[in-house]
Structures are given as structure tokens and as C-alpha cells.
Image (cartoon, grey):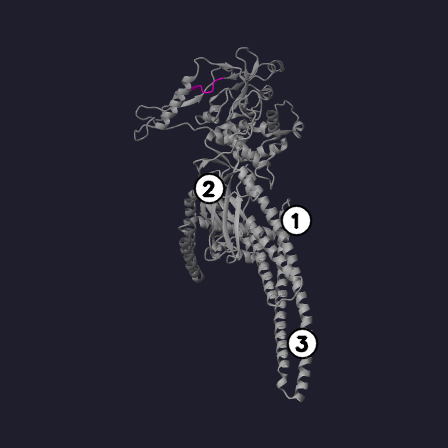
Amino acid sequence: MALWIQAQHLQGDALHQMQSLYGQHFPIEVRHYMAQWLEAQPWDALDLENQQDEFKAKRMLDSLIQELQRRAEHQMGEDGFLLKIKLGHYASQLKSTYDSCPLELVRCVKHILYTEQRLVQDASNASSPGAGPVDGTPQRYQQINQTFEELRVMMQESENDLRKLQHSQEYFIIQYQESLRIQAQLSSTSSIAPAERVQRETSLQSRKSTLEAWLTREANTLQKYRQELAEKYQRTLTLLRKQQALIVDDELIQWKRRQQLSGNGGPAEGGLDMLQAWCEKLADMIWQNRQQIRRVEHLTQQLPIPGPTEELLTELNATVTDIISALVTSTFIIEKQPPQVLKTQTKFSATVRLLVGGKLNVHMNPPQVKATIINEQQAKALLKNENTRNDSSGEILNNNCVMEYHQTTGTLSAHFRTMSLKRIKRADRRGAESVTEEKFTVLFESQFSVGGNELVFHVKTLSLPVVVIVHGSQDNNAMATVLWDNAFSEPGRVPFVVPDKIVWPQLCEALNMKYKSEVQSDRGLSEDNLLFLAQKAFSSSSNNPEDYRNMTITWSQFNRESLPGRNFTFWQWFDGVIELMKKHLKSHWNDGAILGFLNKQQAQDMLMSKPNGTFLLRFSDSEIGGITIAWVAVNPNKPGERMVWNLMPFTTRDFSIRSLADRISDLNHLLFLYPSQPKDEVFSRYCTPPNSKAVGDGYVKPEIKQVVKVEFSSAIPEPSPGNSSFIEHAASPTISQPHNFTIYPSMNDPMLETEGEFDLDETMDMARQVEEFLRQPMETQWSGQQS
């Protein structure tokens, strides 16, 4: 409700803009009486392009109608009676309007709330300039708005001058007609008596001379007016072009860059409503100038007066056409990009939008948009305006869509909801390039006319690069190509040129952005984490972060060459960590329970100064998507000595069987999470609660527990300097017991359902565990393999 209270204090043009948001599609009275309810709903959680959210939208519509009806029923008194009727009427009206298309209600309310918020923010920035964000965004907005006001004044002056010119020219034509009438009278004086003729001719000659002198002067004045007016249009168009460059070449390009970075996990690119409002203002002003220039041209054709104005008007007409053409073609954009890793035979969606479509009334004859997939070379040829008609690199099903006009938001867009890439034709690969490094793009194109077919536009726009895969196993490498391209490509590049090497801090920023987004955490990669990654990427042992500041990493080092001694690349290892974290360990990372980015030696150095039973969690060096538990305990073979143990790494497959918290709870020799937190304080809330179902039909459900087949002393001696010194040079064994489980019968859970039916899922689960158990050797295996 706070937003509505602030919106009611808007003044002037902002108030008019706010009022224009409402109408029969959404009455302002509903906004007023339902303000608190409307602002409390999760409108942003609904995806307008996802038809599966239509059911949620329907529930929100029903809730809104029920709330309106409830408010109506509680109205009392004479004034309440009228309000009761109104609210009931609005409830019926909203149901009638949106019952068949509830997502349109969501679109409408999101547009209203976003615009109100923007107007309130703009008003706040105007009243207190020092309160704006540090990036100067409000100042740029203020500059754009001031330029629009300057343009409005210039156009009003031009309109006034044009009317003055028109009136002057009309009077000139009248006087010119009068001179012709006098000339005709002079020609007919022969029929008049000689004495009267002389007097008559003298009078007419005098009037003719006076009028001709005036006409000469007035013709020069008209020519001067025309020239001055043409020069005014020239100045206006120069300022319009400058304003358009600021909006289209700066603000819109920045929006596209944010959209690209959002593919790497960057913040959302933000709405297009403000950009559309600016573009529509531009379109309106450009079109008005075009109409005024054409009126001046008509006046010059109506009364030709030799001079330079005609040539200048021809140039102005061409200039204004170029400006409007550039605006239309630049504002045909992809609002929702197709997936950048595109799997064949899989449905995908995309949305294109024409920001000036509503203002130019393009929707009066809705254009059709076609989607085609093309390769890198075809994209280059397209931007060079080479003939690429009918060229494509594959076949997309359901690739035609008609643009729809949404009256509530004033947007003209085409929603491709069920496209599918049926087949792909690959180009010849270059050198060591793999299929997951080949880039394609989806070309969207359309054709339409404006101004009663005065101007015809053929618009095209290219999607962000997409990598086409045919199997899920290619997803990892394809995502590497996408991440590198999104992070390091430059605006205005030749498709799809990207640097082959970049400095390490640039990659750190991209990796951190991706990690935080995938793990959905505010806890990103620390300086220590990034130092560990640098050591891994460069196969370096330096512990000084400054050593890596100016180092460059190539694409080959990132995801083409395997890490030393491994059969996977740097990115494949890092992506494995991301997959493990987002699927199973998000909460533990957010709690700070996982240190993760440590090598075996670092873990040993950290644990040897801690009491026995202290443990930490680190990512495996040797296995993609693996995490291991390292802990300090006595050496059972050498009493009195202490050493660090490493459990065989767990992977996603292991955690789909039993969670990390449950596994740590099972291992009684793990006591303290590094540095000194009792493990139950950290992990107990994530443990699976004990099953309390009653026994039925003689069957009991088994439980799976993690065990390590090594006896550890429960005593917790303080570390002694002597022991510590010895163990620092000792090997740190890896316990090769990835799937050793003890099966404990539980008397509380039947294998059968209450109806006595066989539980297939649980039985298959057990079968998989038994299979894993049987694969284990009969005796405990010790391995010194690096993990």
C-alpha cells in the first residue's frame, strides 16, 4: 500500500501518466480499494510466457474477485451502498475481461505497479537529487527527459511558424489573384471612352505597381520564412538524432548487455517499459516532424519560389525517413532469448517485441514474424547486407508467429511458445574446434508498413549465440562456450568474435557471477576460493593473489586442454562443483559449512592444529562433482600419533541415496566442523527424521547408514607439538569406502503400503544399494590415490 500512498502525491505530467494506466481494463477504484492486497501479491513470480503459470494466474484472478466481493459485502450506510454496487460491478467486469486469459491480468498489474514505481522514483529523484544511486542513472534519465522537453518546445515553435507561413502564403495568393484581376481590367479598357480610359488606366497602373512591389517583397519574405523554418527542422532533427543515439545506442545497448550477462547469472536485465516510453516519444516526435516537413513541401509546390529551400527540404525529408527507419529497425528486439544451449527435438520458446509498434499503429495490420536458425558465417553475411535469402542451417518447427497487441500495456510482441529444432546442419570445423564450440543464432524477421503504406520496413534481429547439442552429455562443454561468449564479447562485434584470451580477474568475475546464480546464494567465491581456482587453472603453487592479477588465461586452458594428470578441463571440474552444490548442498554452502576450495595439503595443515574428530568438507581434485570429508584422528596402527583422513569423494549419485547431513550424522567419529562447531549444531536440522510408521504384515523397511570400517578412538587428546610435527610429513590416507552401508532393521516402517500394494520405488532403491554393496571387495581397501 506504501506505493499507492506515494503515487497519490504525484503531480503534473507524472500524475497524468499514472492516471492513463487505468480504464475499463482495470479501474482506478480497484487499485485504490485493493491497494494493500495488490501490492502484497507475488506478481513477479509468474512468467507471462509460461503457459503452466496460467493456473496460478487464474487463482490470483479468483482471489482478487473474491476479495472485491468481500469488500463489497462489508460496506454499510448510504455511501457504502453505492460503493457496494460499484465494487460488485468491478468484480464482474474483471471476471468477464480476464477469465479466459488470466495471464493478461498479471501482465496488466505488473505494468501498472512497475510504472507507478518508476514515476514515484523519478519524482523522488527530482525533489532530492542527492538521493539517487551512485551510478548516475537518475541523472541520465533527467537528461533524456530534459531533451524531450526541449524538443517539444522546438516542435511547438515550428508548428506556430508553419501556421504563420501558411497564413502568409494564403494572403500572398489572394493578393496575387488581385494583381491578375487588375491586369485583366487593364486589358479591357479599350471599350471605355478615351477621356475616362486615361484616368482608369492611370489608377489601375498605380495599383498594379504598388501590388507588384508588395508581391516582390512578400515573395522574398515567404522565401525567408521557408528557409528559416527548414533550418529549424534541421536543428530539430539533429537533436532528435542525438536523443535517439542516447536511447538506442546507449540505453538499449546497455539493456541488451545486461540481458546477455543474465545468461551467465547476472542480475535481471530489467523491464522495457521505460525504454518503450522513450522510443514511443521519439517515434511520435519524428513522425510529427515528418508531417510538418511534408506540409512545407506542399506549400512550396503550391507556390513555387526559386531558392535553396526546395533542395534543403528534400534533404530533410530523406533525413527524417532515415531516422524513423533506424528507430524502427533498432527497436525490433528479443525480449526473451531462446535457450543458449539448444537441444534438438526439444521444445523452446522466445519473445520478440517492437517497442514502437503501438505508437505507429503497426498492430492495425498485425505482422508475422519468422524464426530461422543460421550459422556464424551466414550471420556475418547478413550484417554485410549480402544476399542470404532462404539460407538456413537447420529446420525449426512452429517458427511463424503473428505479433499481438496488448492494450493494457501498449506492447506489440510475438510469443513463440512451442518451437522445436528438428535438425541442424553443421559447418566444417576449424582446427581443434569441437561441435560444442560451434555457434549459431536464431534470426527473427518481419515486414510491415506504417502511415498507410507510406513506409515499408523489413526488420531483422539476431538472438544471442546458441550452441546446438543432440545429447545431454554435451551440455557441460556447450555451457562453457556460452559463458565465455556472454562474458567477454564486445558490443557491435562481428558475429561471433570473442577474445581467445583474457586476464584472470575477468574470468574470476564471470565464474563468481555464474556460481552465485546457480547456487542461488549471496555467498560468492572468496579471495581464497579464487586463489585456489587460479592455482588449479595455471598449475601453480604460488599463494600470492597478486601473482595472478596480470596473468592471462586462454580458451584452451579454460575448456579445451585437460588439467595436468586429469582427464577433464578446468571448466568441467568447476561446473561439476556447481552441479553438485545446486542439486544437493546449497543450504550447507549458504550456512558456511562447506569450505570446498581446498587441496589435500591445505586441509591437512588446517586440521592438524585441531582436536581429534574435527573435520571439514572440500571438493575433490580428482573427481568431477565430488566432495570429500577430511578429519583428524589417531593413527590406529601407531598409538599416540595423529593423522588426517580423507573419505572417498561423494557425488550427486551418492547424495540421491542419502544426504550429506545424514552421512555426517552416521559417522560418530566426526565431532566438530572446522574450526570448532559441534556438528549437530550445523547439520542436525537437515537430517532425515526417524521413521515412526507401524509394522505391517510382517515386513519391515530397512534403513541405510554410512559406516567407515576403521576403528577410531573416541578420546579427544589435545594436539601435541611433537605429534603435529611428525604428522605434517606423514601421508594422508584416503578411505576407499564410498558405499559401505550397514542395514539396520526398523520395526516401524512396512515395506507394503496400507492397501497392501508392493512399493516398487522403495524396492528398486534397495536393489540399487544391494548392487553397490556387492560390488565392494570383501576386505577394507586402502588407497593412497589423490582425491
Counting from the top left corner in percent of width and height, residue 577 is at 53, 28
Looking at the picture, does residue 349 appear above or below residue 162?
above
Q: How dense is the environment of label 3, judged by Cα within 10 Å: few (below 14), some, or many (20 and up)?
A: some
Q: CA distance from mark 1 to mark 2?
A: 43 Å
Whether label 2 touches label 3, CB < 8 Å:
no
Left or right relative to 667: residue 311: right
Viewer-closest of 167 and 687: 167
What amino acid type is highlighted by mark number 3? Leu
Where residue 307 sits, quadrant-wise, is bottom right
Report the disc number at residue 130.
Answer: 1
Which residues are drawn in magenta?
Answer: 736-741
Report the disc number at residue 211.
Answer: 3
Q: What element does badge 2 sit on?
A: strand
Counting from the top left corner in percent of width and height, residue 211 is at 67, 76
Q: Nearer the viewer, mark 1 or mark 2?
A: 2
Residue 168 appears in view: yes
Q: Earlier in the sequence, mark 3 or mark 1?
A: 1
Asked if residue 179 lies in the magenta stretch, the reply is no
Numbered marks: total: 3
Left or right relative to 727: residue 683: left
Looking at the picture, does residue 326 appear above or below residue 173?
above
What amino acid type is highlighted by mark number 2? Ser
Q: How dense is the environment of label 1, judged by Cα within 10 Å: few (below 14), some, or many (20 and up)?
A: few
What amino acid type is highlighted by mark number 1? Gly
Circle 2 residue = 349
Q: CA distance from mark 3 to mark 1?
A: 64 Å
Q: Earlier in the sequence, mark 2 or mark 3?
A: 3
Q: What element does badge 3 sit on?
A: helix
Q: What element does badge 1 sit on?
A: helix
Magenta part, dominant SS: loop
